[in-house]
Amino acid sequence: MVTAPGGTIALNKRPSFWDSFESEAYAAIAGLGPVPDGTIVQLARFSANGTGFSVITTTTISGGRYSFNLAGLGLQPATDLIVRVAGSNGREMRAFVVGTAADISPVSEATCQLVIQALGDGLLSNYTLQEVSDITGAVGSIALSQNIGNAVTVAEVVALVKSAVDSNSSVMSFIANAAKGGESTQGTSDVGNFFPFEQGNIWRYRGRTSSLLGVTNYDTTVLVSGQGPSPISGINSTIFFETNSQGANREGRHYDVKGPTGVVSHGSDDPNDSLTRQLVPYQSVRFPLTPGTSIVLLERTGLNWGNDEDGDGRNEMFSFKLFQNVLTMEPLTVPAGTFIDSLHIEFKAVFVVSFTRGGQATLTQTNSDWHAPGVGKVKEVISVQIDGGTSETVLTEELEGYVVNGYGSGLRIEVKPSSVSMRVGEENTLQATAFDMSNNQVVGLPYMWLSSDPSIATVRQDGTLLGIGKGTATVTALLGALKSNSVPVTVSDVKVLQLATNDLAYDNVSRKLYASVPGTHGRIATIDPVTGSVSQSAVVGDEPDRLAISDDGQFLYVSIDNENAVRRLTLPALTADLTVPLANMAPVTHPGEFLCGKDMKVVPGNARTVVVAIARHPIASGSCAFNEPDGAAVYEDGTMLPNTMTGSSSVHRLEFSNSPSLLFGLGTFSPGSLSRLSLTASGLSLIDSNRLTNWPGRDFKFLDDVVYTASGDVISATTYSVVGSFTNTGAYSIRPDGNSKQLFAVTVAGTYDSVATIQAFDLNTLTLKSALDIPNLGIPVMAQYPRFTSLVRWGTDGLAFRTSSNEVVIVRSPLVSP
């Protein structure tokens, strides 16, 4: 398109949107190949309702151009004035003559059809020149965004363009309102969304300023941060927050309102910008953005310059004029990528300053902007010119990253830590950092935080994470539409009971925890693990210690350390059933010496039979904890079976295999041993015993032909060879769980005895999956005493253990769930 001088209209058929069907479309009109020189172009006038036309004059195409001298014909642009070409087959293309240029194309033909269809019984005179011009521009903008596919005729392209316009409710509504008569105030809106105003949009620019002080490079980020009143006009506006406005090392907020007719500026929060305060509100952008159009957006006079430039003690006055020139659609490459359909828009502000001593100075600031559809501004060049002198570029900004309506590139947010395990009521700190495409940190950004489930975890705006309830949630940092990595948060419910205990056991039938409470009148306490409350207790003897529960929940066996006995209680009532005298195996020969059950296991499927690992201890030691085992025996309803184990073959810990006739015994004195024991109707017998390569620690468990030790070794139950290991810094107690396919261990967190750590390992890979710290526990009564022991699994998601500082810790956690 070219604009011819002297009131003429002209067409210059140039490579553009039409390249892919130029030959076919024009062939459909001419019935030949591309439109040749000599093709007739008609200047015509529509009938009143647009259903017919009359030819005023004609011309021919020469060199791909045509022109009419409207002034010479005594004509001027009008809503019923058109140019027209037609082919021998009767096909035609028309364009409205509402300005000094008219491009005849399938798009202009689609515009004519849409305008006439909207009239109904009305007249073309209902439209104003500006309305037809706006409709032409809007339809052209929509056409630019369409994929013409395999269209090869004018009719096909016209149909495609009209269909696209039909789907744009803003443009169709404008056409309908304009057809009713009078100047429509509705506008066509921002066809193509060259100025995205959606909350959360974010742009990152690389800038350069030039001044007498030299060149400064900078980065700045612009974020649509929400809605709020303008500090100047008070009008609720869209807020554009900028981190480093024009490289001046200051934050800034601009307030704009986007409507169907354009963008209205309501100023900024810069207290030093006295000029803008005199202008707002004013239209800073007018829609539609039609290439080749120019418009005056604002013109004001009698404004206060705000400075005394000539030194006479009085501020100068100035007049102001703002122009919008929509130039061309063109490809543009910036750090963020190449944008094929960038719309080049020029905003020119002219300041004419009148000096109070006489004379004037003219300052012209030109903002050359390129906007991409659905992206926004991709480049800006600001130049200034004083009194017609040399134009100097003072600022350049290019897009290097963006996220608009959820799409974009070149920006990312990283939140650390990448996962969090915490307790209800606990606080943690999350750190969000933004990076540009060069991996440079972007500072000063106002992040928002989002929790997928605020009933489990919430985040304050400073990144403080709070555990609210048991469960799992994900937390994300948001910067407009830009999202960070999702941080999984696991919140566990941890209850700490102040209760001195020697051992802890869980009954799957009654769903209760049972604790042996030390003392000369020691007792068994029943604990509801869900509520953490002690519901009942029963006195059982002098220093109750190790516990064992039958798998049917019928009996609880309790070792009474200072009575040479094991006592059996019925569950859940905790009533005494019988006493098992341990002296039957090895009579006490020294005063003040007792036999005790160092470990006990009830025979699976046989609630009345219990296997006891027996030790001797002097009363001064207080318990069985640090005494050498003396043997092992089987008791059925209190009667000891004849076959027992004594001496060097004795063990500290017992575990049944998958069979009730095979047990494993662990010797925990260094270097440690692992034995296989046979259980028959006659009692116990040793199958074999092997010294271990590594000390096993003070606990071990059997699951699926594998023995797990507290030290971290995984040992084959058939070959005694180490077949794997899990990273462990010395667990006191472990618990493999076949349901969740995890191995749980409780240990001390680093060197802090007051912090317990529950670790969850994958049973298949033996890798650490998760961990939970439990701080603020008491100081151990004895430094060498096993710190955290008796780890039990309860319910679907529960663990519990005891501490040597007189606490019972009860945990419910998603970490435990299958």
Image: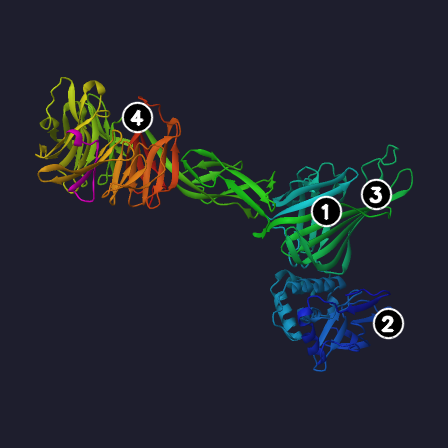
For mark 2, give the secondary structure.
loop
Above or below 71: residue 770: above
Q: Position of residue 816 (x, y in %)?
A: 34, 41
Q: Is residue 232 visible?
A: no
Q: Report the amino acid beneath label 2.
A: Leu
- The one of 531 and 610 positioned closer to us in this rendering: 610
Give the quadrant of residue 40: bottom right
Dot in front, 2 or 1: 1
Q: For marks 2 and 4, give the CA distance.
A: 108 Å
Mark 3 lies on residue = 318
Report if the CB atoms under discs 4 and 1 are less than 8 Å apart: no
Mark 4 lies on residue = 804
The disc, 2 or 1, on the residue closer to the chain's N-terminal end is: 2
The disc, 4 or 3, on the residue closer to the chain's N-terminal end is: 3
Above or below 195: residue 359: above
Q: Is 654 a magenta residue?
A: yes
Q: Residue furthest bottom?
A: 88
The disc, 2 or 3, on the residue closer to the chain's N-terminal end is: 2
Q: For marks 4 and 3, give the CA distance.
A: 84 Å
**Left or right of 531 in this view: 524:** left
Mark 2 lies on residue = 73
Q: Residues in magenta?
A: 647-665
Q: For marks 2 and 3, give the CA distance.
A: 42 Å
Give the quadrant of residue 517: top left
Q: Is 687 a magenta residue?
A: no
Dot in front, 2 or 4: 4
> Pointer 2: residues within 10 angstroms few (<14), some, or many (20+)?
few
Mark 1 lies on residue = 396
For mark 3, give the secondary structure.
strand
Q: Report the amino acid beneath label 1.
A: Thr
